[in-house]
Image: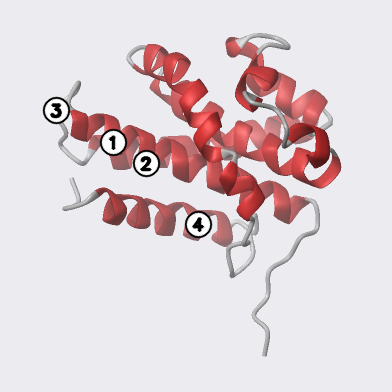
Amino acid sequence: MDSNPTCFEENLLKDLYGYLKLHGEVDDMMPDAPDIEEKWVPVVNAYMADGVREFQQYPLTSLGWMMYVGMAVAQKWDNDWEAFSQLEDPYAVLRDVRGYDEMDEYIAEEVLQLDEQKCEELTKLVGNCTTRTYNYLMHQGLEPGTAQALQAYIGCLHQLYLMGACVQLHRMGYHMTKLS
């Protein structure tokens, strides 16, 4: 693995953000969204039980659902932040409507309010990002079950959460440009 977790995440961020930029899903600059970033800790703390349990048999789902969660948090930031920001467990609120297995569909259809075609496009985008992330993780040569492997998994979840938020902010019309 990269010599430290920060380097691991930075390299993954560059890869994912570059991929999303190439496909017109984000701007040249990453958004600065501290409110969304602040929700990361409660989200990941609640997600770990589900995510780790699912990773062995369904690694792409375990990783990909976090990108959907990032998109949902960004959507809530735009239209319902006063209520959403007060939730102690925002992940459970998203998961419990339809359950873990259908959380992606719930977020796409009801939170993001996408039509069938846009849901399919989003599924493909999340799938591509998740596959890139999983391949990156597997090429680190980490021994499963170690603290280092867990730290890398959490780093992957973090970057997917952030990329989900970036994509959704971009889709909602929040564009980042450098001030001259």
Residue 45 vs residue 140: left or right? right
* Residue underneath mark 4: 17
* Real-space Cα separation, disc 1 to disc 2, in angstroms: 6 Å
Secondary structure of the residue carrying numbered label 1: helix
* Residue underneath mark 3: 143
Q: Residue at x 61, y 38 (%)?
A: 70
Percent across and percent down for residue 78 are 81, 46
Secondary structure of the residue carrying numbered label 4: helix
Q: Quadrant of residue 34?
A: bottom right
Residue 124 visible in this rendered orientation of the protein: no
* Residue underneath mark 1: 151
Q: Are marks 1 and 2 in contact (CB under 8 Å)?
A: yes
Viewer-side label of 3, 2: 2
Residue 127 visible in this rendered orientation of the protein: yes
Q: Are marks 4 and 2 in contact (CB under 8 Å)?
A: no
* Real-space Cα separation, disc 1 to disc 3, in angstroms: 12 Å
Residue 155's label in the rendered image is 2
Q: Would you place residue 108 above or below residue 37 in this image? A: above
Q: Mark 4 packing: few (<14 Cα in 10 Å), some, or many (20+)?
A: many
Q: Mark 2 packing: few (<14 Cα in 10 Å), some, or many (20+)?
A: many
Q: Mark 3 packing: few (<14 Cα in 10 Å), some, or many (20+)?
A: few
Q: Quadrant of the C terminus?
A: bottom right
Residue 58 vs residue 140: left or right? right
Question: Amino acid under label 2?
Answer: Gly
